[in-house]
Image (tube, rainbow, N blue to C red):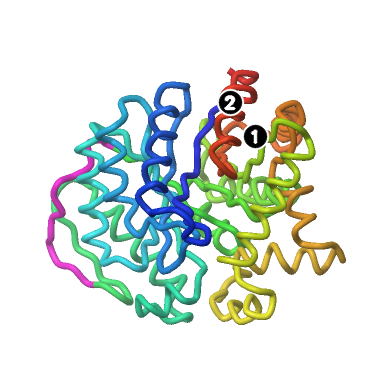
Amino acid sequence: MKFGVLQFFSWPGRRIPLEQVYDRAFDRIRLMDETGYDAVWLAEHHFSTYSVCPSVHIMGAHVAAQTKNIRIGTAISLASFYHPLRLAEEVALLDQLTKGRVNWGAGRGFDAKEHEAFGVAPKDSYPKFRESVEVVLKAWKDGPFSHKGDYYEFNDIEVLPKPYQRDIPVWMAVTSEGSIEWAANQGHSIMLGPHSSHAESKEKRDFYKTALEGAGFSFAGRDIPLTRTVAVGATMAEGLEMGRRGAQFMFGNYLKKKGNIRGGEKMAAEGKTQQNDAILAAERENVDPIERYVDSVALCGDPAKVIDDIERLRDENNLEYLMIAPLGHESFIRFTEKVMPHFQ
């Protein structure tokens, strides 16, 4: 089984200097480089202390200079917020500087504030993202290219440098059936986010496999990362409480209060946003969203419990690649020292 880390740069309550947030993360990433992790996946967010990393490409260059082994993933490049030629250049340059260690993950994003600030109207959210991805992939091919779409037009232009890797690995972040079906029809691999339950994630993986093969592409040999928030405590009670605090921070700080979440539905031209998935599923099941998250979404408890949960995901969900989002440095250390070796 492969393991990666979805690296946030969270700054809850701004309680410590921001440079300590970065330094602590870099210490963690250097440890990842030495202990067998496949990749660090850098999370892009804007205008929020949820994760103070507005450029995964600049951050990736810094991480590359401090590591030798791990791959450097973007999880995700918010493609519609960039001019696609500039995005193609930045990722290709990062791949050159890392001698081919880049995994490119792209996504639409779901925060209405980010879209408004970057001038992406709700009706343009999906189509502009998809056209941006199309342009980036064309730009990485040999020689110049031309493109004429709804948002961009280019004639006989060549983006340089090309990526170091002949075929840079590409993933699309998906949540709705529409986004999964689009990725499958294009032959893209997918990554599954941290807000769907284990059962929902299995359904999405199965739906993707059916759609991918129906479009004439092979499923075999693809890494399909599943992202899970991880809270590994010294005891069961500590791990569960750590998971509850993490869920409260996510729902309260970034996924917004329940009353604001419904307003985010205007962002969903083709399906619910991630935050709607988490809250509305809890409403349907008539359970507290925090407890649902701890019980059915995150991996929480002592090391033995987390090992059991991962084994069950491997057996029931065909999990082969787990991308963890650790809730705290101690949780990361326990996962690295007490959980991951069980699967190596």
Of labels 2 and 1, earlier in sequence is: 2
> Does the rendering let one see residue 186?
no
Report crowding for label 1: few under 14, some 14 to 19, many 20 or more residues within 10 A (C-alpha).
many
273 sits to left or right of 162: right
The residue at the point 68 percent across, 34 percent down is 318
Label 1: which secondary element: loop
* Residue 152, x across and y down, in percent: 26, 72
> Is most of the magenta stretch helix, strand or loop?
loop
Count the marks: how many?
Answer: 2
**Range covered by the magenta-colored residues:** 153-166
Quick check: marks 2 and 1 in contact, CB under 8 Å? yes
Residue that carries the numbered disc 1 in the rendered image: 319
The residue at the point 27 percent across, 49 percent down is 91
Residue that carries the numbered disc 2 in the rendered image: 1
| Quadrant the N terminus occupies | top right
| Residues at marks 2 and 1, CA–CA distance in whole angstroms | 8 Å
Q: Is residue 145 above or below residue 342?
A: below
* Residue 300, x across and y down, in percent: 72, 40
Badge 2 amino acid: Met
> Does the rendering let one see residue 252?
yes
Report crowding for label 2: few under 14, some 14 to 19, many 20 or more residues within 10 A (C-alpha).
few
* Label ID, residue 58: none
Q: Which of 149 and 257 is in front in this view?
A: 257
Residue 275 colored in magenta in the image: no
The residue at the point 44 percent across, 29 percent down is 32
- The image quadrant of residue 186 is bottom left
